[in-house]
Image (cartoon, helix red, strand yellow):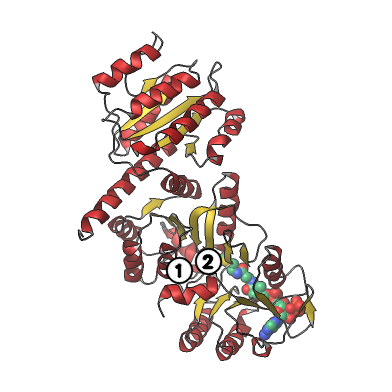
């Protein structure tokens, strides 16, 4: 079987055994069973615990071997030293895939590394795919399956998240929820003893619910396999590669047993396969949201509209400092803009529509800028100057995004102000319009869309013509 077929029983299981399902609400084995049930999983669930006959109203079995039905997925949450025995039982039961939540493997040193090798060998011999060990599990908001510990689900959406860190993974889910960013699948890969990032990229490449793959990586064991998977993935990939410095790298080796490797090597490898690199969680989601909901930019020429001169200048600086251009407007465009501008400003790029701009001035100037053949993307800025009307600015951005899709030019929003503006621009987030609280974030999101345009260009040129 291929990777995708192998992973289906793990990610779309018809039956799940929770090995180490616990009676105690304080334990991880309790939480996993609870989370599966809370989300209303419709397949069969088998709590496995030799010490008690019933947990959460479900009859338990002392081992997977006592379960009469087939088991697609076993989630293991018993102490590390008992995992090999449990894995042997899963192999004998012909369980199709296993997630080992337990810590105490390669991340702890030589003894743990040998234990990890042992369970990986059991899985390989039996043809069972293994996720982990030392993983959180996964959360699938599209199919409402919470196969992880820690309570709480992501909002359903189009961005898949693969994380080598469990705690960070949960933090990223809550961050995304707060930003109104929906996720398709969230997969914690832990020590990646068997199933690794490359396998998951292959799996998500074929997932109709996923538009963009976002990743948090500490180390990659099989570089060639990873690069091959990234290269054949038709979807954009954004990744944080942590452990860039000696201090970060040392921490990664005790966290997930990862060898971080040379950062320069990762950097050039990512560039080769067009993985966009982010350096923190905010940047990861800034890029992922732009890639999921705005078209790639066909060129690097950016139009900027702002109701504050300073914010426009800063945005122009950011654009030009990261390889974008803020070109002069065509004469036709400048002439078209003039009737809509107050006398105190001039028709140029960046365009200062001045502090009293209302819906109509933002909307008309945005439409005119977008129709300029020298402009490939648009950044619309709102500064909460005393007379500014952020709600009207938001309305104009929404109307432009909705009306001008056919132009295939990205539009991103940027604002400067206090919590009251943050609250108003939530309307943009709800509509999946990229909106950023700084000029640098907005400019870098546009740069990311420009790089995506280049990736698609390269891919289409490599594709044999039919
Ligand atoms: N089969 C089935 N059930 C068993 C077995 C067995 N062979 N052996 C024990 N059990 C039962 C126990 O009786 C217990 O149930 P009970 O509470 O009703 O008595 C339950 O399984 C759990 O066993 P405990 O021995 O109580 O183990 P505990 O829950 O304390 O710890 C755990 C197990 C959670 C796997 C722990 O060893 C561990 O690894 N914790 C860390 C997990 C983690 O952080 N993972 C990584 C996160 S992601 C990241 O950061 C990279």
Q: Is 21 situated left or right of 200 in this image?
A: right
Q: Ligand 1 within 8 A of label 1's CB? A: no
Give the answer, above or below, for where 275 lies relative to 291: below
Q: Residue furthest front?
A: 466
Q: Ligand 1 within 8 A of label 2's CB? A: yes
Q: Is 397 situated left or right of 57 in this image?
A: left
Give the answer, above or below, for where 64 lies relative to 178: below
Name the foreground residue: 27 vs 251.
27
Element on which disc 2 rests: helix
Picture quadrant of residue 404 = top left
Picture quadrant of residue 40 = bottom right
Element on which disc 1 rests: loop
User: Quadrant where the C terminus lies?
Assistant: bottom left
Whether residue 100 is visible, yes or no, is yes
Residue at 36% over, 38% down: 406
Disc marking residue 258: 1
The spot of residue 224 in percent (x, y) is 31, 70
Residue at 57% over, 79% down: 72
Residue at 50% over, 25% down: 393
Residue identifier under label 2? 255
Picture quadrant of residue 99 = bottom right
Q: Quadrant of ligand 1?
A: bottom right
Q: Is the Cβ of the residue at disc 2 closer than 8 Å to that at disc 1?
A: yes
The spot of residue 337 in percent (x, y) is 34, 17
Q: Is 18 situated left or right of 130 in this image?
A: right
Whether residue 109 is visible, yes or no, is no
Q: Residues within 10 Å of mark 1 (few under 14, many from 20)?
A: many
Give the answer, above or below, for where 346 lies relative to 396: above
């Amino acid at each position: 079987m291929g990777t995708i077929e192998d992973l289906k029983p793990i990610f779309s299981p018809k039956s799940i055994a929770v090995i180490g399902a616990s009676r105690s609400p304080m334990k991880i084995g309790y939480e996993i069973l609870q989370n599966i049930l809370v989300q209303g999983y419709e397949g069969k669930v088998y709590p496995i615990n030799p010490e008690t006959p019933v947990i959460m109203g479900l009859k338990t079995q002392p081992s997977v071997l006592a379960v009469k039905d087939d088991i697609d997925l076993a989630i293991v949450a018993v102490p590390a030293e008992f995992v090999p025995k449990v894995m042997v039982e899963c192999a004998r039961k012909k369980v199709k895939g296993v997630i080992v939540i337990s810590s105490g493997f390669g991340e702890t040193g030589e003894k743990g590394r040998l234990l990890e090798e042992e369970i990986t060998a059991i899985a390989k011999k039996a043809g069972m795919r293994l996720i982990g060990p030392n993983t959180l599990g996964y959360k699938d908001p599209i199919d409402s399956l919470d196969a992880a510990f820690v309570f709480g689900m992501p909002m359903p959406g189009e961005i898949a998240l693969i994380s080598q860190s469990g705690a960070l993974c949960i933090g990223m889910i809550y961050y995304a929820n707060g930003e109104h960013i929906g996720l398709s699948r969230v997969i914690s890969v832990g020590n990646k003893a068997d199933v690794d990032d490359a396998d998951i990229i292959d799996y998500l490449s074929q997932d109709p619910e996923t538009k963009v793959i976002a990743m948090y990586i500490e180390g990659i064991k099989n570089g060639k396999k990873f690069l091959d998977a990234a290269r054949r993935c038709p979807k954009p990939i954004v990744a944080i590669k942590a452990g860039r410095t000696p201090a970060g790298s040392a921490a990664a080796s005790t966290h997930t047993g990862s060898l971080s490797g040379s950062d320069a090597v990762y950097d050039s490898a990512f560039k080769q396969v067009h993985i966009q690199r982010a350096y923190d969680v905010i940047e990861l989601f800034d890029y992922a949201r732009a890639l999921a909901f705005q078209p790639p930019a066909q060129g690097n020429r950016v139009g900027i509209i702002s109701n504050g001169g300073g914010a426009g200048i800063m945005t122009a600086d950011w654009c030009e400092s990261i390889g974008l251009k803020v070109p002069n407007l065509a004469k036709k465009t400048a002439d078209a803009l003039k009737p809509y501008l107050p006398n105190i400003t001039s028709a140029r790029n960046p365009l200062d529509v001045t502090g009293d701009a209302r819906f109509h001035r933002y909307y008309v100037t945005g439409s005119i800028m977008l129709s300029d053949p020298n402009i490939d993307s648009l950044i619309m800025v709102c500064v909460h100057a005393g007379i500014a009307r952020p709600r009207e600015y938001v309305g104009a951005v929404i109307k432009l995004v909705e009306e001008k899709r056919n132009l295939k030019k990205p539009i991103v929003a940027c604002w400067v102000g206090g919590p009251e503006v943050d609250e108003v621009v939530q309307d943009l987030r709800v509509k999946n319009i990229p909106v950023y609280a700084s000029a640098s974030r907005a400019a870098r999101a546009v740069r990311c869309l420009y790089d995506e345009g280049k990736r698609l260009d390269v891919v289409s040129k490599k594709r044999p013509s039919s």
